[in-house]
Amino acid sequence: MPVKTVAVIGAGASGLTAIKCCLDEGLEPTCFEKSEDIGGLWRYKEHSEGDRASIYQSVIINTSKEMMCYSDYPIPEHFPNYMHNSKIMDYFQMYAREFDLLNHIQLKTAVCSIRRSPNFSTTGQWIVTTEKEGKQEVSVFDAVMICTGHHTFPNLPLSSFPGIENFKGQYLHSRDYKFPDDFKNKRIVVIGIGNSGGDIAVELSRTAQQVFLSTRRGAWVTNRVSTNGYPVDIAKSSRFGSIFQKTLPTLVNYMAEKALNDRFNHGNYGLLPQHRYNSQHPTVNDDLPNRIIAGFVQIKPNIKKFTDTGVIFEDETIEENIDAVIFATGYSFSFPFCEETVISVKKNQTALYKLMFPYQLEKHTLAVIGLIQPLGAIMPISELQSRLAVRVFKGLVQLPDNVSMVREIVHKRMKMADRYVESQRHTIQVDYVAYMDELATLAGVKPDLFRMFLTDPQLAFHVFFGPCTPYQYRLTGPGKWSGAREAIFTQWKRIIKPTQTRILKRSAVDSSALLMLKVCAVFIVLTALFLYFS
Ligand code: NAP
C-alpha cells in the first residue's frame, strides 16, 4: 500500500523541515504542534511551560549560519554568523513562508498517542489521537515522523546532592532560568559545565555578587570565534579534517588541547579535565575565561553536600550564604505518547537504527527526526534524516535486515562508550560529516568526490577542503538543488558580509582564501605531475 499521509509531531527545527521533505516527495503531511506557534525550542517565552522546551532570553546558537541552514535555503548574507534565538525564529518563519509549510500545521494540537493500526503488518498505518481545546480526535496516517526534540524534560538529580532538602536558598533547573534580573547582587552556584552552565554562569557574573561554577570533571572550553575570526565550525568542519579525526584521533586531540591551552591554560583556570578533548560534548564559550580571570566566576569541584545556607564542595571548601543554585544538569528524553514496544528509552539510551528507525517494526513507517547531539548543527541533519525517512516510507530506500540493524546499533553504542566519558549526555552523539555521509549514502545524495575532481575540480576542491556546508548534499541525487554549487562558491561571502559593516578603502587580504588558493595550486600541480609520469 503506497504511503501518502504523514503525521509530523512538532513544528520546531526538525518538524518544519520534515514537512518540507514530505511535500518534496509528493506526500501529504499534517503537522501537530502543541503550542501556539512554530519554532519549538527556539521560540523564547518569558516563562517555561509544562512539557515544552524552554530557553533563556540571551541564547545565541553555537553553530554558525552556513553550517546550520537547511541545504536549499541559505540564511541571508546580512544575518550574523552566530544568531540570537530571535533571528533563528526569523529564519524559520522565512523558511515556512517560502515553502508554504504553515498550511500543513495544526497549532495548539497535542498528540496524545500513536498506536500501530490492527493491520499494521500489512498497511504500516498508525492511529494518531490528538487533542485540541479539550476535544480528542482520532485519525489514521500512513507514516509518522516524531520531531519532538530532546531538550524538554529536565534532568534534576536532587538525590545526588545530600542536604538539598534543608537548603533554604532558591534552586531551579536551567530550563527555568530566563534572565539575570532576579539574581542581582546574589551569591550563586551553577552546577554543570555544559553549554547552559557556561552561558548562565557568564551572564549572571555580570550582575551577581559572586558565581561559583561547579563541575565534576572539568571541560575543554572552545571559542565561537576561531583563527582569523571565522566561525569555529567553518574552520573545523571539512571533509579533509574529518579524515584526520577518523584516522589520527590522538593527534587531533593533542592539537586541539594545545590550541585551547595556548589561549588560556586550563589547569591554571581549574577547568582541566582528565579526559581528552574529543571525549566530551564541547563547551563553547568565548567569555568564560574573561569572567574567571576577573574573579567573577570561580570554578569549583562537585558539591559534596548542601548545608542550610551554603554548600560544601568535594575539596572540603565551604561557601556560605548561597542565595541560589542553578542545576544546569542537562535533559532526559522520552516519547510519552508512544508505546514502549515501539520506542523504549532507558537513561537516554534507545535502540534506533541510524538514531531514527525502530528496527523491530514490520513496516518502516515511523522515524524519529532530530534525536541526535551532533558535533555540529542539528537543522541540516534533521533535514537529511527527513529526506531519507520519506524515501524509506515510499519504499525507494530499503533498510537492512533486523540482524544487520541491531549489529550496527550495538557497534555504534560501543564506539560511543569507548570515545566519550560515561554520562547520560553522551548517548546520541554524532560527528557531523561522518553521520551526514552515512545518511547521504543511504539516501543516494552523497557527493561523489572522485568523479567531481575529474568533472568539476574547482567545486571538488571546495567540497573536500572547505567547510562541509549542507549544500553539499544537494549537488546530486534525489532532491538535487540547482543552486547548490553557487551556494558553495558564495558561502565565504555570506560569512564575511555581516561583520564588514565599515567599508574600508582597501580591503585586507583574506588569508584563508589565499591559503585555499595556495593549497589548490599545490594540489593541481601534484595531480598534473602524477598524470604526466604515470
Ligand atoms: P548538558 O550538555 O547535558 O550538560 C550537563 C552538565 O551537567 C554536564 O556538565 C554534566 O556533567 C553535568 N551534570 C549532569 N548530571 C550531574 C550530576 N548528577 N552531578 C553533577 N553534574 C552533573 O546540558 P546543557 O548544558 O543544558 O546542554 C543541553 C544541550 O543544549 C547541548 O546539546 C548543548 O550544546 C545545547 N545548548 C546550546 C546552547 C547554545 O547553542 N548556546 C546553550 C545551551 C545548551 P558530566 O559531563 O560530568 O555528565
Image (tube, rainbow, N blue to C red):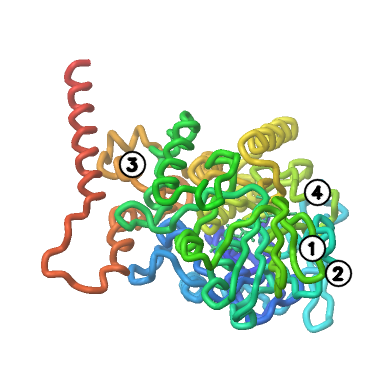
Separation (CA) of disc 1 from disc 3:
51 Å
Q: Which mark, by number, is residue 166?
A: 2
**Residue 230, percent from left and from top:** 34, 56
Q: Are marks 1 and 2 in contact (CB under 8 Å)?
A: yes
Separation (CA) of disc 1 from disc 2:
8 Å
Separation (CA) of disc 3 from disc 2:
57 Å
Q: Which mark, by number, is residue 346?
A: 4
Q: Disc 3 vs disc 2: which is toward the camera?
A: 2
Which element type, helix, strand or loop, lies under badge 1? strand
User: Mark 4 or 3 closer to N-term?
Assistant: 4
User: Mark 4 or 1 closer to N-term?
Assistant: 1
Residue 332's place in the image compared with 167, above or below, is: above
Q: Residue at x 75, y 46 (%)?
A: 350
User: Mark 4 or 2 closer to N-term?
Assistant: 2
User: As drawn, is 379 to the left or to the right of 170?
Assistant: left
Q: Are marks 1 and 3 in contact (CB under 8 Å)?
A: no
Which of the 4 image quarters holds residue 19?
A: bottom right
User: As drawn, is 493 to the left or to the right of 9?
Assistant: left
**Residue 57, percent from left and from top:** 57, 76
The residue beneath circle 3 is 465
Q: Residue at x 68, y 81 (%)?
A: 47
Q: Does the residue labelled 3 lie within 8 Å of ligand 1?
A: no
Label 1 neighbourhood size at 10 Å, few (<14), some (14-19), many (20+)? many
The residue beneath circle 1 is 306
Which element type, helix, strand or loop, lies under badge 3? helix
Residue 196's place in the image compared with 528, above or below, is: below
